[in-house]
Image (cartoon, helix red, strand yellow):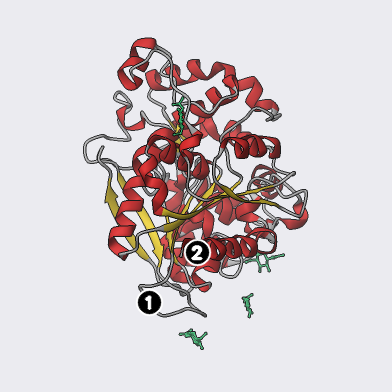
Amino acid sequence: MYNMLLFVFLATAVAARRSPGADYVENWLKEDGNNRYSSNIIEDALLDAPSLIEKYGYPVEIHKLITPDYYILEIHRIPHGRDQNNESDPTRPVVLAMHGLISSSADFITQGPNVSLGYILAESGYDVWLANARGNYYSRANLYLDPDDRRNQDFWRFSWDEIGNIDIPTIVDYILELTGHSKLHYIGHSQGCTSFFVLNSLRPEYNEKFISFQGLAPAAFFVYNEVPFNKVISPYEAVTQLASEKLGFSEILGNRAAFTWFATRYCKEGDIFHDLCVYLLMDGDIDYFNTTLSPVFLGHMPAGSSIRQVNHYAQCVNIKEFRRYDHHRPILNIETYDRPVAPLYNLSQVTAPVYLHYSFGDVTTDYRDVLHLAERLPNVAGMHLIQRSTFSHRDYLWATDAKVQVYNKLIQLMREAEANAK
Ligand SMILES: *[C@@H]1O[C@H](CO)[C@@H](O)[C@H](O)[C@H]1NC(C)=O
Ligand SMILES: *[C@@H]1O[C@H](CO)[C@@H](O)[C@H](O)[C@H]1NC(C)=O
Ligand SMILES: *[C@@H]1O[C@H](CO)[C@@H](O)[C@H](O)[C@H]1NC(C)=O
Ligand SMILES: *[C@@H]1O[C@H](CO)[C@@H](O)[C@H](O)[C@H]1NC(C)=O
């Protein structure tokens, strides 16, 4: 994640939201003839998540929700399967999947049917909802705040605290209301897990709305994290936060059009930057990474975040605790938390059944930090150590063997939790 962050931060900070290059690629595609490798790869990089789902013959719905603080969230639904469980059925169990930092709902579909989790869940008989947190490509809107206003950065004054405390409950309540169910499964990847812990520690009444929580690379603690970049950069988090707000660059990696443009021109097999793209995207074992799909991955991730999300993690790295966002000035902390120092999240309040999936090969969510987390959670129903020891952070989404390593077990654990809930 961070090598990519480092590489592209400046590029996106100065680029326009939709680069002229995106139009170019689209026209180029229409003319055809230039697609030396696979027109599908280019198309998959360009399409947005709902169009991609539609392209592969799955039913898709787009829902727009408004949070109490007026962010407009766009979430995507695959109500049923294509080959199996392919009729709508209101009794299907509901599952909500939440992406990680600078990512989006596309995380769960970019490898395509049979391989990506979103499709596998739909085929397995689930009503699948893919969320998008405030500030990303799909949820970059607010009724009153302008994300493009450089002088007023109010739109971007949020971290994953607000995503957990405001976005997720809005989404959960909406889905339960619409489907008539009283509970759902929640699958989080990385920050998607962080925000789940935020929600249930701050608003414990939500615990009972979850049949199970499935945490893929559950990020909360960074006590044992050894990624050098984290250690070097994290101490400067207060400075980067202040500078980005003052300069009007509180959004990071938000220019999907620019990445798509780059990905479709330079990342394909045989293109000059193919190896660079693979290097930036892959964080694990190349034997389990489909390099052909690099343009698709880069076309959808990064999808944008607030810099405060990164800085909030940096604070957790610095203090080795899972704590609410520190506003750096006691007076601001008092305004928000009624005390001069930001409080810790109380993980004892997270009483929903928790299943943690973790791996020795994941340096971003170190397995020792997952064990540290598990000790602090009162209701750990299952721990799933991934068998392949080189399985990495992004492998949960992008590994060719993710189904074998994770998803099959994940679905088995979901069914177990459903049986327990009856
Ligand atoms: C729906 O699922 C059934 C049973 O798996 C299958 O026979 C049928 O071909 C599927 N229908 C479509 C339109 O794919
Ligand atoms: C998808 O998986 C099913 C069984 O799980 C298999 O029958 C089918 O051939 C696969 N399709 C592709 C395109 O790999
Ligand atoms: C990689 O993706 C391409 C395009 O979808 C596919 O044709 C190929 O079979 C995949 N390779 C592996 C090893 O999964
Ligand atoms: C955390 O929650 C637990 C369980 O509700 C409670 O007993 C404990 O006092 C809380 N701790 C703090 C510091 O609020």
Alpha-carbon neighbours of circle 2 within 10 Å: few (<14), some, or many (≥20)?
Answer: some
Task: Specify the amino acid type for callout 2.
Answer: Glu
Residue 143 image point, x, y percent: 22, 41
Residue 388 image point, x, y percent: 77, 54
Residue 30 visible at all: no
Question: Given contact means CB atoms under 8 Å apart, are the residues at marks 1 and 2 in contact?
Answer: no
- At mark 1, the secondary structure is loop
Whichever of callouts 1 and 2 sits on the residue coming sooner in the sequence is 1
Does the beta carbon of the residue at mark 1 sit less than 8 Å from ligand 1?
Answer: no
- At mark 2, the secondary structure is helix
Tell me the mark number nearer the camera, choosing from 1 and 2. 2
Picture residue at 76% right of the left edge, 52% below the top: 286
| Residue 263 in the figure: left or right of residue 128 | right
Residue 183 image point, x, y percent: 39, 58
Picture residue at 32% right of the left edge, 35% below the top: 147
Q: Quadrant of ligand 3?
A: bottom right
Q: From what the image shows, is residue 338 above or below residue 102?
A: above
Q: From what the image shows, is residue 13 above or below residue 93?
A: above
Picture residue at 33% right of the left edge, 21% below the top: 336
Between the residue at mark 1 and the residue at mark 2, the CA separation in whole angstroms equals 20 Å
Task: Specify the amino acid type for callout 1.
Answer: Ser
Q: From what the image shows, is residue 290 above or below residue 346?
A: below
Q: Nearer the viewer, residue 132 or 33?
A: 132
| Residue 213 in the figure: left or right of residue 62 | right
Alpha-carbon neighbours of circle 1 within 10 Å: few (<14), some, or many (≥20)?
Answer: few
Q: From what the image shows, is residue 237 above or below residue 252?
A: above
Q: Where is the N terminus found, in terms of image quarters?
A: top right
- Mark 1 highlights which residue? 88
The disc at residue 365 is: none
Residue 261 image point, x, y percent: 51, 49
- Mark 2 highlights which residue? 418
Q: Nearer the viewer, residue 377 or 191?
A: 377
